Image (cartoon, grey):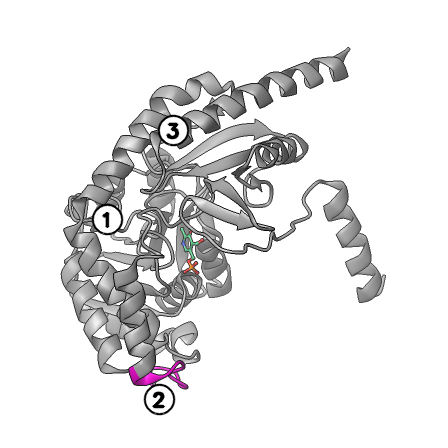
Amino acid sequence: MNLKNKIKTKLKEIKLSNGFRVRKVKDSGNSHIFVYKNKELLSFASNDYLSLSNDKRIINSAKKALDNHGYSTSSSALISGYTKSHFKLEEELSNFLGQEKTLLFSTGYQANLGVIKSLVSRGDNIISDKLNHASLIDGSLTSRANFKRYNHNDCKNLEEMLIGTKGKNNLVVSDSLFSMDGDTPNIKKMSTLAKKYDALLLIDEAHSIGIFEKYGRGLIYKNSLNNKENIFVTGTFGKAIGTFGAFFSGKKDHVEYVLQKARSYIYSTSLPINAVEATRKSLKIISKENWRREKLFSLISYYKKNIKKSGFTSLKSNSQIQALLVGSSKDALYVSDQLFKSGIYIPAIRPPTVEEGKSRLRISLTVDHQLSDIDYLINILQKISRNLVQSQECVKK
Ligand SMILES: Cc1ncc(COP(=O)(O)O)c(C=O)c1O
């Protein structure tokens, strides 16, 4: 089969398995609103958890930076793209996270790729949670280290693997808040195990920065695991922080080492200054405005109390990410379409993002949601689940 035919066949296969992905052109909106073809939908599909992406103070900081510096830095950081703004944000992030040093990356994907590939190579071991984000998996695979996966959030299984690889260079990798399930690992226990077996621990705080800990410093800080010799952190600005960009933080020497080695850092244009200044402003807001976290957690507890009524199985989560299991890709698409018809936007999450048979709705709650939005969602879900059960029963007959 030549390449052209292969592409044709593969596309057909993707469509037949209900896995074909289509992008919806958004007119405007973020956080809890998605405007599509001039129609305003209630959205539960954004990572703008603190509803900051449209904050005027952040926008004004970005505008000012644009006026003063133009758009592109026109260079990688190591050539001429590292400015006072980049330097200040790195310092401020280190202070905020209680870490020695920070390195800015252009995206979280690039950060995970660059960091993992810098830290380990052929002959070393990566021990990774089975549900880790794609960027952690891709970084692991491109590093050429041995790639081992332990059962999701299973510290016993992690320890077995650490015992089996004793004496080798081991890097344990995990999300701190899983993007498709909304659950968290026991990072305290993971840290103890990493220490006991002399492994390094890389934690991706993409979804927890801004949300957890009194000032939003994330789960590493909340568990007093910041500024530790064997623990590193990555994160992105594209979620709760409401801007764009990413970072890697840890002990000075480790960050300095990644700066020397990470190809996704060295060979890529540095973050635009407007994104950097917007992030500096957002961090100040995040650490001051505790009411945002308080409101978000009150929405989370209201959702959890009431979601049982929906008729769908809700995965266990104490975070702003809540998943409703549907099952097949076909059914998940059906539920998503029905919600859309009722003015609610929640795309179906299907394989390969999640396991086969575990297609779902990923519901993300944001500060700008109201209790009445949750009521409306649950009400519509109830109707859809009844229809779904009826149609499944018809198929069985
Ligand atoms: C856990 C996790 N890590 C990393 C990333 C990538 O971040 P970015 O969007 O900045 O590339 C994401 C985003 O989807 C994520 O969910």
Image x and y of residue 208, in percent? 30, 47
Q: Is mark 2 within 8 Å of ligand 1?
A: no
Q: Is residue 255 magenta?
A: no
Q: Which is closer to the viewer, label 3 or label 2?
A: 3
The amino acid type found where label 1 is placed reads Gly
Residue depicted at 59% across the width and 35% down the height: 336
In the rendered structure, which disc, 1 or 3, sits on the residue that comes first in sequence?
Answer: 1
Dot 1 falls on a residue whose secondary structure is helix
In the visual, does 37 lie left or right of 309? right
Task: Look at mark 3 in the image and give the residue it sits on.
Answer: 372
Q: Nearer the viewer, residue 73 or 374?
A: 374
Q: CA distance from mark 1 to mark 2?
A: 32 Å
Which quadrant of the view contains residue 65? bottom left
Residue depicted at 25% across the width and 52% down the height: 198
Which dot marks residue 79? 2
Above-or-below relation of 73 to 61: below
Which segment did they paint magenta? 68-80
Helix, strand or loop for the magenta stretch, by majority: loop
In the visual, does 6 lie left or right of 208? right
Q: CA distance from mark 3 to mark 2?
A: 52 Å
The amino acid type found where label 2 is placed reads Ile
Image x and y of residue 2, in percent? 84, 65
Whether residue 253 is visible, yes or no, is: no
Number of callouts in the render? 3
Above-or-below relation of 383 to 163: above
Query: Label 3 near label 1: C-beta < 8 Å?
Result: no
Dot 3 falls on a residue whose secondary structure is helix
In the rendered structure, which disc, 1 or 2, sits on the residue that comes first in sequence?
Answer: 2
Q: Nearer the viewer, residue 45 or 157?
A: 45
Q: Is mark 3 within 8 Å of ligand 1?
A: no
The amino acid type found where label 3 is placed reads Ser
Task: Look at mark 1 in the image and give the residue it sits on.
Answer: 218
